[in-house]
Amino acid sequence: MTSEHISPFGRLLLDRRAFLRLTGTTLGGLGLAQLLAAADSPESFTGKKPVRPLIDPDNPYTPRPPHFQAAAKQVLVIYCPGAVSHVDTFDYKPDLAKFHGQKPPGIPAVTFEGPTGSIAKPFWDFKPRGQCGKMTSELLPRMGALADEFCFIHSLHTQTSAHPQGENFFNTGFTMEGFPSFGAWVTYALGSEASDLPAFVAINDPRGLARSGKNNFGSGFLPAAFQGTDFNAKNPPANLKRPAAYSANDDRATIDLLKRFNARHLEQFPGDADLAARIASYELAGKMQMSVPKMMDLSSEPESIHKEYGTDTGTELKREYAKNCILARRLIEKGVRVVQLFNGSDPAGGNGITNWDSHSDILQTHAMQAEIMDQPTAALITDLKRRGLLKDTLVVWCTEFGRMPFLQGNGTGRDHNPDAFTCFLAGAGVKKGFSYGESDNFGAKAVVNPVEVYDFNATILHLMGLDHERLSYYHNGLERRLTSVHGHVIMDVLA
């Protein structure tokens, strides 16, 4: 073919530089088209497409169906900041007594807070509990007595040995701040059956917030409507009470007028999730003016319930925590989707005084925390079962990491252990009187069926009818998940 028969574009391709330039532009265009197609119909690295919940901005808490049918409709998370010692509570290790006072080869010379000491046997005796014969310690005898209800996971391990990052990682799936909490993900996906109460309630310890504060129940980059509402039996939600000089009719008229203004403003800014969330929160606050006073009035509970939970015995902290446990049960009864109950506090630390972080005198400090937690928490779980609420409610007892089998250099405390710790599940969808995974003979490392925090959270979502690989939110060019790009459901713990 002569050059006269070649088109101008064809002659352009005969030029080497023009050919390379056009090829690069074409390939870039193909890549852009692929990216735009992915953005229009995104898929995760697993090949699964995200499930986007259909959320009405005006009614963000409307109940929504799960990805698939599951046993659990609600979840109660009992979170213990500070790191509970698994080897002194639920993970029985006879070799600790065998090697007590010794320093076998392999013990690190230094851990998180300094030089290490010798192996230490449990500070409390262990005994078999229930028909399953589970060995649990005398530190938590009432909770141990419920061993037939629990599904223990003994092989958990985590990415960090620092408390703020540990709390973040356990509750949000990331060590950094700014990511949605577990409760926010669940309420984003499912909404709530409670129309006059928050979908997600965080009941803080009587002593205050945990180390990572509101990040533990924040909404991160999810719509602001799905952050947890924090209050407890001692401190009800602020600013709900109507001033005495302000009549109910005046209040109603103001609310109606504000609703019309809000609707008009929202019409001018459609799709503004923050604005919609703010309007929804004010409307919910109006409903809570009626519902919360009744919810907070624990005097309506019979005396037998107060005695069972222990609101009339022990230290003031224990009595207040017991009231928080009654409040948690009442919230579950009313259909609140996620209730997160904290046993421990202090954003500045506490070394076993305000939480479970026992670097010294663990015999005294863990005992103090256990006295607060044991009776009320056991009563809460027993009460949920008696009322038939465990059929639909998943109970999660957890802490950010464990503690070492040997003492610190001071000879009285145990240091942080991110390589092995214990949590348990109970209620809807999980096996009873069951133990999964194992740590080594000293409780130092997870060795049999190791479980990442990603796996733990994936399993909780699964029990709520949510596929952790499809529950995502497009943010800053990424399909973000509670489990990041990790996590497997622990099928062996499912009932």
Image: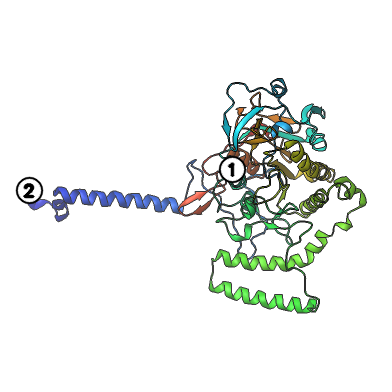
Q: Are marks 1 and 2 in contact (CB under 8 Å)?
A: no
Label 1 Cα neighbours within 10 Å, binned few <14 / some 14-19 / many ≥20:
some
Residue found at the far right of this picture: 303
Q: Position of residue 136 (x, y in %)?
A: 77, 30
User: Can see residue 448?
Assistant: no
Label 2 Cα neighbours within 10 Å, binned few <14 / some 14-19 / many ≥20:
few
Give whichever of 464, 205 is nearer the camera.
205
Residue under pointer 1: 162
Q: Position of residue 354 (x, y in %)?
A: 72, 47
Relative to 130, does residue 184 appear above or below in the rendering?
A: below
Q: Going by the image, does 112 lie left or right of 336?
A: left
Residue under pointer 2: 2
User: Residue at left 50%, top 49%?
Assistant: 479
Judged by depth in the image, the label closer to the viewer, 1 or 2, is 1
Residue found at the far front of this picture: 410
Q: Quadrant of the C terminus?
A: top right
| Secondary element type, mark 2 | loop
Number of marks in picture: 2
Q: Going by the image, does 336 lie left or right of 449?
A: right
Q: Earlier in the sequence, mark 1 or mark 2?
A: 2
Q: Going by the image, does 388 lie left or right of 162?
A: right
Residue type at tag 1: Ala
Give whichever of 353, 262 is nearer the camera.
353
| Secondary element type, mark 1 | loop
Residue type at tag 2: Thr
Q: Going by the image, does 79 lie left or right of 37?
A: right
